[in-house]
Image (cartoon, rainbow, N blue to C red):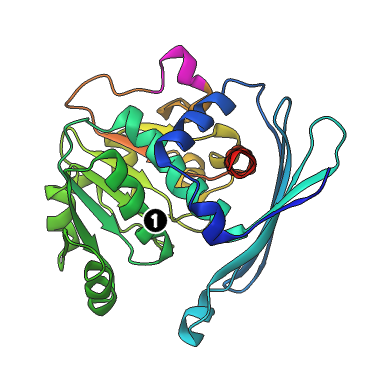
Amino acid sequence: MSIDNIPFAEGESLLDWHALILASEAGHRLPRAKIGDTLLNRGDDTLLSRSAWIDGLGLAVKTATVFPGNSELDKPTVNGGMYLYSDEDGTLEAVVDFHLVTKWKTAGDSLLAAKKLARPDSKSILIIGAGTVGNSLREAYGSLFPTASFTIWNRSIAAAEKFASRYDNVTVAKNLEIAVRAADIVTSATMATSPLIKGDWLQPGQHIDLIGAYRPDMREADDKALQRACVFVDSRETTLDHIGELKTPLEQGAITRSTVIADFYDLETGAFARTSDQDITLFKNGGGAHLDLMTGRYILDAWRRR
């Protein structure tokens, strides 16, 4: 079999956020993924290699480099590559554009959680962080909540204004606390190493979606936010002991492992769900390699059906 090489634009034209959610749900009904991660750092620069094997779905290896200083050079801060292998014989099936997989995996991960945890009548969505992921979130959340209004907050007002100029219904927030208090959904994708979102700001019925923290020294929400909320993750295995958002408060005793109610592997049991309109739900998007595999396989299937 020939190897499929899937570039960004041609691949993305075939994709749909709702179909991706269904593919992810189906992937989580398969046996739990075997996962291996390697994280290397040099100062603020990061090399992250993630691999996954799901019986019945195949194998994937994705390597990402994160160089925050690239933004000052007008270069992408995140780069890398992804390979998909056959579950039957281990042969290479496809090379998928790294940014295509990352965009749809990251935003799709949060979108599946929002479908289960956010109030269906949510009308106001705050995006924290005007970077590449923030733009993906505007697109993804817009597909699930087509009548919602959006607000963008960013440390740089100029960047927030540039973000808002790309869309018809996005306004710029200058005060983060006021913006958080007013939103039905708060989705955050920043490089913060200390909490931006305070638990004292949260309101009954909100859904909080935390994406940015991916290292042990990174956090976007404080202890009180975790203590006040019903906490969910995409995978206990890839978040609790690896990402500062949960690792730090666990080590310091601010929360316990039982604070996390469910992950995506609990979807079939019904545990991954909002139980009251008054609940504050909080989701940590860890973005493990198993999600890259599920997303990559969805992309490859769409590519082969074209």
Q: Residue at x 39, y 67 (%)?
A: 131
Q: Is residue 261 visible?
A: yes
Q: Nearer the viewer, residue 172 or 180?
A: 172
- Please tell me which residue lies in front, 94 or 152: 94
Task: Tell me what residue is drawn at x 54 percent, y 45 percent.
Answer: 287
Relative height, residue 28 to residue 104 (above, below): above
Q: Amino acid at mark 1?
A: Ser
Residue 38 seen anywhere in this rendered image of the structure: no
Q: Residue at x 68, y 60 (%)?
A: 81
Nearer the observer, 253 or 150: 150
The question of residue 271 being in magenta is answered with: yes
Quadrant occupied by the C terminus:
top right
Q: Mark 1: give few (<14), some (14-19) or many (20+) Cα within 10 Å.
A: some
User: Quadrant of the rendered structure where residue 60 is?
Assistant: top right
Q: Position of residue 263 (x, y in %)?
A: 48, 28
User: At which x and y percent is residue 58?
Assistant: 74, 34
- List the single residue furthest toward the bottom: 73
Say which residue appears at 61% left-offset and 45% top-offset: 303
Q: Quadrant of residue 232?
A: top left
Residue 271 sits above or below residue 18 on the image: above
Find numbered disc 1 in the image and state the secondary structure of the residue it sits on. Answer: helix
Looking at the rendered image, the quarter that the N terminus falls into is: top right
Which residue is at the far front?
306
Q: Which residue is mark 1?
A: 136
Q: How far across and down, in percent of the image, does residue 164 sit?
A: 22, 67
Residue 224 is one of the magenta-drawn residues: no
Q: Write down the region rendered in magenta.
A: 266-272
